[in-house]
């Protein structure tokens, strides 16, 4: 189940500090939300709780049947766009 986090700027950890205090980083991820690890000032990785990772990476539908039975509308691709036709002048019969 996903945990609701207070919306705020994620905490940044330098890689040396994250290595030295890995348990604290994990606790912060569970309590405060995603934690960003930086290397030489560059954001390199994000640590999130496993339940949040599963929620983010899980496919919305497991198969075509679930997709077809889903309650939301899927009308954007029902019919292709109509082509613009140019009319030719009618032939003249003399």
Image (cartoon, rainbow, N blue to C red):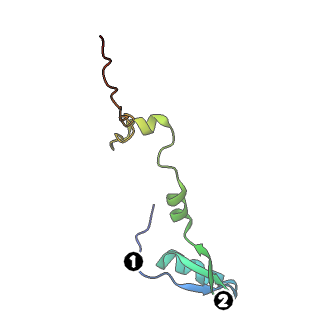
- Which residue, given by chain and number where applicable, does mark 2 sit on? 17
- Give the number of marks: 2
Question: Which one is nearer the viewer's eye here, 88 or 13?
Answer: 88
Query: Dividing the picture into quarters, in which one does residue 6 lie?
Result: bottom left
Query: Dividing the picture into quarters, in which one does residue 43 lie?
Result: bottom right
Q: Helix, strand or loop at disc 1?
A: loop
For disc 2, the neighbor class at 10 Å (few under 14, some 14 to 19, many from 20) is some
Q: Marks 2 and 1, Cα distance to the nearest angstrom? A: 24 Å
In the picture, the quarter occupied by the C terminus is top left
- Which residue, given by chain and number where applicable, does mark 1 sit on? 7
Is the residue 70 above or below the residue 87 in the image? Answer: below
Q: Which mark is residue 75?
A: none
| Residue under the image location 33 percent in, 18 percent down | 91
Question: Which one is nearer the viewer's eye here, 35 or 73?
Answer: 73
* For marks 2 and 1 on the same chain, the one whose residue lies earlier in the sequence: 1
Q: CB of mark 2 within 8 Å of CB of mark 1?
A: no
For disc 1, the neighbor class at 10 Å (few under 14, some 14 to 19, many from 20) is few
Question: Which one is nearer the viewer's eye here, 35 or 79?
Answer: 79
Seen as rendered, the residue at the extreme front is 94
User: Residue 13 location in percent, x, y?
Assistant: 60, 86
User: Residue 25 location in percent, x, y?
Assistant: 59, 81
Is the residue 54 above or below the residue 10 in the image? Answer: above
Is the residue 49 above or below the residue 69 in the image? Answer: below
In the picture, the quarter occupied by the N terminus is bottom left
Question: Which one is nearer the viewer's eye here, 78 or 49?
Answer: 78
User: Residue 75 location in percent, x, y?
Assistant: 34, 39
Is the residue 23 above or below the residue 4 in the image? Answer: below
| Residue under the image location 38 percent in, 34 percent down | 83
| Residue under the image location 30 percent in, 20 percent down | 90
Q: Helix, strand or loop at disc 2?
A: helix
């Amino acid at each position: 189940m996903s945990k609701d986090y207070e919306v705020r700027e994620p905490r940044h950890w330098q890689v040396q500090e994250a290595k030295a205090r890995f348990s604290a980083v994990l606790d912060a991820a569970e309590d405060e939300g995603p934690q960003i690890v930086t290397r030489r000032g560059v954001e390199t990785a994000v640590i999130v709780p496993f339940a949040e990772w599963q929620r983010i990476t899980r496919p919305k539908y497991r198969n075509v049947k679930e997709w077809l039975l889903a309650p939301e509308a899927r009308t954007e691709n029902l019919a292709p766009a109509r082509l613009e036709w140019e009319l030719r002048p009618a032939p003249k019969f003399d």
